[in-house]
Image (cartoon, grey):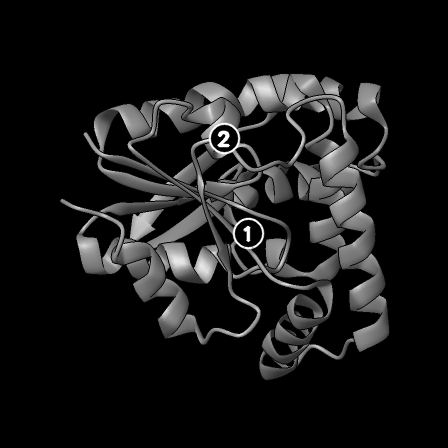
Amino acid sequence: MINIAIDGPAGAGKSSVARAAAEKLGFIYVDTGALYRSIGVNAMRNGIAPDDRNGVISLLPSTKLELKYIDGVQRVFLGGDDISEEIRLPEASMAASNVSAIPEVREFLLDLQRDIAKNNNVIMDGRDIGTVILPDAQYKFFLTASAEVRAERRFKELKEKGIEVDYNQLLDEIIKRDYNDSHRETAPLKKADDAILIDSSDMTLEESIDAIIGKIKV
């Protein structure tokens, strides 16, 4: 099996690039950020703050999380409910940052992610795929962009979905999340030593996709 890891900060375009690259290569795309967002959403649904470690941990034994591929698209189910749209809201993003700092949450999701990679050709994106989840991946990339560019991309994405958001608030949240993700004790966001760095600040989506696919031999 061929495993491709794409890491990078929030809003760098990892999901869009990985999804498109997987489609072109005929691989399965695994959006690991969606899993952490789901844990965060589950906490909020149960009235628990995502940074309440003990509260979040208490929910894990009863958490039923599934990834299903419907018409080639990854959908996320929590307790049987399709929450694929709910996890894309800004509050779910911040919740993901909080719960992902909890070691027990990362351990809870580790086996699920590795099992998928063990049995399929996958492109998996996240914060610690190349460093922790799939350290032996044949190809590793670190995709990034300036905070301002990432905030603008997220702003346009949400506006197109009819979600009213404030650009400056998005920028502040991205800067805060960058700090949280890179300074947490467990599996902090960082570039793997053998990962290829791609700065997409001045790239179109298609150029970012080509930059990655051009390095892969299948």
The kind of residue on which mark 2 rests is: Asp
Which one is in front in this view, the residue at disc 2 or the one at disc 1?
A: 2
The kind of residue on which mark 1 rests is: Ile
Q: Helix, strand or loop at disc 2?
A: loop
Query: Which residue is under mark 2?
Result: 193
Comparing 194 with 41, the one in front is 194
Q: Quadrant of residue 113?
A: top left
Q: Look at the picture and state if 128 lies above or below 204.
A: above
- Quarter of the rendering occupied by the N terminus: top left
Q: Find residue 121 and report its horizontal and vertical position in percent.
A: 22, 37
Observer able to see residue 72: no
Q: Find residue 8 and report its horizontal and vertical position in percent.
A: 56, 47
Query: Which residue is under mark 1?
Result: 83
Q: Look at the picture and state if 67 lies above or below 9.
A: above
Report the residue at 51% width, 32% height from top.
Answer: 192
Report the residue at 34% width, 61% height from top.
Answer: 211
Observer able to see residue 147: yes
Report the residue at 78% width, 76% height from top.
Answer: 165
Which disc, if any, is residue 169? none
Distance between mark 2 and mark 1 Cα atoms: 35 Å
Image side of residue 193 versus residue 171, left or right: left
